[in-house]
Image (cartoon, grey):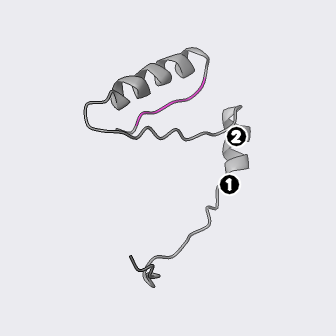
Amino acid sequence: MKNTKNNNVVWHHATVTRERREAQNGHNSVILWFTGLSGAGKSTLAHAVEEELHSMGCKTFVFD
């Protein structure tokens, strides 16, 4: 496999930094990725984790 660089993909630095989001939200930002085979329970697990974090006062969202 050959690694090639795409010239049409450009990194954009966020104007709202992670630190600013954390200060506004009152907690550290985290992204959780669940990967696996279809039907393995990723969505079920994601929603269970969301429920637990939400009950702890964290702002949550499942993007499925």
Q: Distance between the Cα atoms at labels 1 and 2?
A: 9 Å
Q: How would you rate the neighbour count of disc 2 (Cα within 10 Å): few for under 14, some for 14-19, many for 20 or more? A: few
Q: Give the range drawn in magenta.
A: 58-62
The stretch drawn in magenta includes residue 8: no
Point out residue 34 in the picture as x, y percentages from the top left corner. Answer: 44, 37
Residue type (three-letter) at the residue carrying disc 1: Thr
The image shows residue 39 at horizontal and vertical percentages of 25, 31
Q: Is residue 19 left or right of residue 59?
A: right
- Determine the residue located farthest toward the top in the rendered image: 55
Provide the secondary structure element on which disc 1 rests. loop
Judge whether 24 appears above or below 19 on screen: above
Residue 24 position within the rendered picture, expressed as x and y whole percent measured from the top left: 69, 38
Residue 26 occupies which quadrant of the picture? top right
Q: Nearer the viewer, residue 5 or 27?
A: 5
Q: Report which residue position mark 2 lands on.
A: 22
When the figure is inspected, residue 18 is found, relative to residue 35, above or below; the finding is below
Which quarter of the figure is the N terminus placed in? bottom left
Q: Where is residue 20 in the image (x, y as percent from the top left)?
A: 71, 47
Q: Main secondary structure of the magenta part?
A: loop
Q: Residue at left 36%, top 31%? A: 42
- Residue at 42% of width from left, 33% of height from top? 62
57 up-or-down from 42: above or below: above
In the depicted view, which residue is nearer to us: 26 or 43? 43
1 or 2: tag closer to the N-terminus:
1
* Crowd band around label 1 with a 10 angstrom C-alpha radius: few (<14), some (14–19), many (20+): few
Is 24 left or right of 58, judged from the image as shown?
A: right
Q: In which quarter of the image is the C terminus?
A: top left
Q: What residue type is labelled 2?
A: Glu
Question: To which quarter of the image does residue 41 belong?
Answer: top left
Tell me what residue is drawn at x 60 percent, y 25 percent: 58
- Residue at point 55%, 41% (across, down): 31
Residue that numbered label 1 is attached to: 17
